[in-house]
Image (cartoon, rainbow, N blue to C red):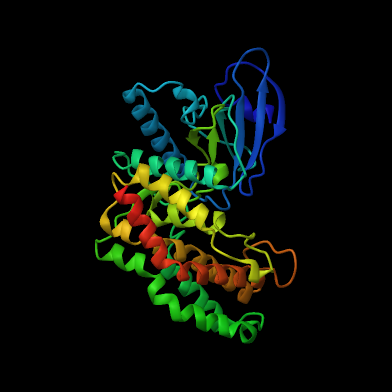
Amino acid sequence: MEEIISQFKIAGKPAEIVPLGKGLINDTFLVSTEGDCENYVLQRINNAIFTDVDLLQHNIEAVTRHLRAKLIAEGADDIDRRVLRFVPTAEGKTYYRDAEGKYWRLSVFIPRATTHETVDPEHSYHAGRAFGQFEASLVDIPDTLGETIPDFHNMELRMRQLRDAVKRDAVGRLAEVRPIVDTLESHADAMCLAERLGREGKLPKRICHCDTKVNNMMFGEDGKVLCVIDLDTVMPSFVFSDYGDFLRTAANTVAEDSPETYKVAFRTDIFEAFTRGYLESARSFLTPAEIDNLPYAVSLFPFMQCVRFLTDYINGDTYYKTAYAEHNLVRTRNQLRLFECTQEQQTYMRRFISTCLND
């Protein structure tokens, strides 16, 4: 690792390298340096998932450059703690490919900052404001960004994948899940609304984070959000990606793989806190079509995840890691129940959003 770090233009000499965080995709390490020099975060980029590392880093460089320029123009304080800084190599790139074909990047560690795993109304409100502001700040980005994971949140594609799995029935599991397949098919047309609106020119694609979890933000000592982190999935998408996916994970009363589906419920306190924060910062650019369909987005993401879990179960568990034979089926039933809960709350969600806008 010291050999890898030496490829980057760092200040100081590495004194210690230790694992950092619990990321499921990239391998991350904290690099402490000797003396008073700044510390760093070293990451091995998982190029099995992010196959186009050039595009990945282009997106991240464009976004961080634009965010930094905006902070400078605003006369903001403490800019180096409010946007990620990546260290270049001797060739001027923000990543290095080693002799084994592995990709690495190095960023400056943000001091006096923490992440939170807690999902409560207070943190959900801050998350809503932060991710809404993140989108708002990138509305006028001059660079063209690409999709680091093509069709990541394309519901029409996910339904095609499910239908292909049903046709193959590779491991003979279709019969036991046929009722679930039929239920999903009955909602498929409604849940593919975003793609239709996009083709009709009624729904724009924005630059979105696409992995909106509360632990993808850094908080300062005052409890306020410093910056949004984990930018690998930043790409063009519908705003539903950021709004709906946060609530899929945060507003479920149980974990997504809990077998106790009778305990699944939609947390309205989390919905209200996140929505209020999101609209405070994002309403400046959201179109009427985007606002009108935010409740749809809340249902879309548990539906989409249900389809993905079920597809993998029918295929024989080839994509998601499983701990036991019916793990993906348990996940499927959990997300289906959450979808049903969000459907029951559509009128309530519309009224709350209207209230927020009027306030």
Which residue is farthest bottom? 175
Residue 124 drawn at (x, y percent) = 51, 46
Q: Is residue 37 above or below residue 253?
A: above
**Quadrant holding the N terminus:** top right
At x 37% / y 47%, what residue is drawn? Answer: 279
Residue 187 drawn at (x, y percent) = 44, 77
* Apparent side of residue 182 relative to residue 42 in the rendered image (left or right): left
Please count the marks in the image: 0
Q: Dividing the picture into quarters, in which one does residue 176 lie?
A: bottom right
Residue 186 drawn at (x, y percent) = 45, 81
* Apparent side of residue 235 relative to residue 224 in the rendered image (left or right): left
Q: Dividing the picture into quarters, in which one does residue 200 lie?
A: bottom left
Asked if residue 317 can be seen in this view, the reply is no
Asked if residue 354 can be seen in this view, the reply is yes
Residue 55 drawn at (x, y percent) = 44, 45
From the viewer's side, name the closer residue of 68 and 51: 68
Which residue is farthest left? 201
Which residue is farthest top? 35
At x 31% / y 24%, what residue is drawn? Answer: 73
From the viewer's side, name the closer residue of 117 and 92: 117
At x 54% / y 35%, what residue is drawn? Answer: 218
